[in-house]
Amino acid sequence: MKSFFKILIFSVLFVNLTLASQVDDLMKQGNDAYKNGNYRSAITDYGKLVHQGYEGVSLFYNLGNAYYKEAKIGYAILYYEKALKLSPNDDDIQHNLAIANAKTVDKIDTLPEFFIFQIWESLLSFFSVTGWTYLTYFLFILILVSAGIYFFTKNPGVQRYSFFSGLALLCAFILSVVILSINVNRNLNVKNGIIITQAVSAKLSPDSKSNDAFVIHEGLKVRMEDKVDNWVKIRLNDGKIGWLPENDIAQI
């Protein structure tokens, strides 16, 4: 029995090491192709990793750069947005995304938000879901440490300090849990997409024979609200609603 488990563990480790080596090789091939100006080859190599289900800031960022070099603005913005979703405060991603967005055709006017809502949205996007999860766990551990110090120390000054520190940490923990819950809920229920075709006419209903609602172009970010067969219902930032074939849009 012990020999069986040893063989099983060895097999799992061998497979994991082999897969990790393949990922590193594809990333290196993609990076080398990009450095040599062979952007299509870089897109192919990075794309293989994406199709295999791999995610990563560097992978999405590099893929966005390769698409941008190929003048495929829609796909460039798509992968910059995917990278930004994993690392919301990355200056390089934000910079390149802004440059790519400047090349889009559609400039949708939005109503200005009240400054308090702007601050709240900035707080929500300060970390990714993973980042807020780590922070929540860290605050919880600090609360336990503070409680342990309070109950096990006999020094009144230390007890007072640990008590008020624990209250402050508890407030921060509750806020972190609320923000984490909102972000998780958004990830599950709010879907944004990027238009990836050069130009497309949104329809009034999910039917190719329906009247046109408006025309939009690649790179535009929209809200994906519903899906019927191979049609996706979208909402623009100005409130306009239309239906697109699902091949014309990619979810972030």
Image (cartoon, grey):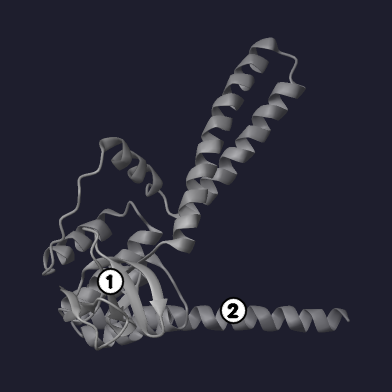
Asked if 143 appears above or below 55 in the picture, the reply is above
Up/down of 29 relative to 239, above or below: below
**Residue 88 placed where, x, y %?**
35, 54
Q: Where is residue 86 in the image (x, y as percent from the top left)?
A: 40, 60
Number of callouts in the render?
A: 2
Work out which residue is located at the far right of the displayed protein and give it. Answer: 1
Taking the image as shown, residue 98 lies to the left or right of residue 58, namely: left
Neighbourhood count class around disc 2 (C-alpha, 10 Å): few under 14, some 14–19, many 20 upward: few
Q: Name the residue under label 1.
A: 194
Q: How many neighbours does mark 1 have within 10 angstroms: few (below 14), some (14-19), or many (20 or more)?
A: many
Quarter residue 171 falls in: top right
Q: What element carries label 2?
A: helix
- The structure residue drawn at horizontal position 34% and vertical position 64%, both measured from the top left corner, is 83
Residue picked out by circle 2: 16
* Residue at the top extreme of this rendering: 156
Residue at coordinates 51% horizontally, 41% vertically from top-left?
176
Residue 93 image offset from top left, x and y in percent:
27, 60
- The amino acid sitting under disc 1 is Ile
* Earlier-in-chain disc, 1 versus 2: 2
Q: In this view, does 46 lie to the left or right of 154?
A: left
Residue shown at 38% from the left, 47% from the top: 126
Q: Can residue 193 be seen in this view?
A: yes
The quarter of the picture where residue 143 lies is top right
**Quadrant of the snapshot with the N terminus:** bottom right
Q: Give, as a three-letter code, the residue at label 2.
A: Asn
Q: Compared with residue 3, is residue 141 higher up or lower down, i.e. above or below?
A: above
Closer to the eye: label 1 or 2: 1
Q: What's the distance in space between the residues labelled 1 and 2, CA to CA?
A: 34 Å
**How far from the left and from the top, in percent, is residue 177?**
54, 43
Residue found 38% across the figure and 42% down from its top: 123
Vertical side of 45 occupied by 176: above or below: above
Q: Can residue 217 be seen in this view?
A: no
